[in-house]
Amino acid sequence: MRIDFPYVREKSSLFGVVNRPVAKITLQDKITQWMYVDSGADITLIPKSVGKLIGLRRTKRDRPQRIFGVGRSSVPILVKRLSMRLGPTHFRARVAWSQVEDVPLLLGRMDVFPRFKVAFKEKAGVTSFSS
């Protein structure tokens, strides 16, 4: 099985138009979202509203943690295990559910990349997932 996703062209305030790798992911068999494929992200990240849309709830047993990106700023998250689908492949993965809204949807490596051979084909502008 192989599925290819074309890069998306977006405006950057620094670089003009840039091509970014994305993939179409279904979460909890409820919603399908385009996510940036981020080989530098340890874990998949979703905003607070997306978590609520798929039925995530904060419980008394949840222990908020913080994750860091570039620089010293951090984001409060709860780690949840979700059902995901990429093309025909269903699997479960740990996801960082942000407790704030202002974060991008990122498809990170943990529990995702080990399931696929992921190829960033810059010249063709395609991200390829194969099993």
Image: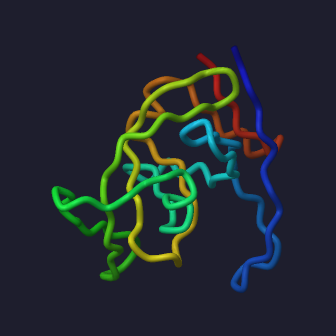
Left/right of residue 83 with respect to residue 18 in the rendered view: left
Q: Residue at x 23, y 66 (%)?
A: 64
Question: Foreground: 41 or 100?
Answer: 100
Q: Picture coordinates of residue 74 (x, y %)?
A: 32, 77
Residue in view at x 82 percent, y 72 percent: 17
Question: How many numbered marks, from 0 up?
Answer: 0
Answer above or below: position of 54 versus 78. above
The answer to whether 89 appears left or right of 51 in the picture is: right
Q: Position of residue 123 (x, y in %)?
A: 80, 44
Q: Quadrant of residue 24?
A: top right
Its colouring scheme is rainbow
- Considering only vertical position in the picture, is 129 above or below 70? above
Considering depth in this image, is 47 or 6 the residue closer to the camera? 47
Residue at 49% across, 26% down: 91
Q: Quadrant of residue 11?
A: bottom right
Q: Nearer the viewer, residue 55 or 39?
A: 55
User: Within the image, what quadrant is residue 56 found in?
Assistant: bottom left
Q: Quadrant of the C terminus?
A: top right
Q: Horizontal and vertical percent for residue 75? A: 35, 74
Q: Is 61 left, or right, of 44 in this rendering?
A: left
Q: Quadrant of the N terminus?
A: top right
Looking at the image, the residue that sits furthest to the bottom is 13
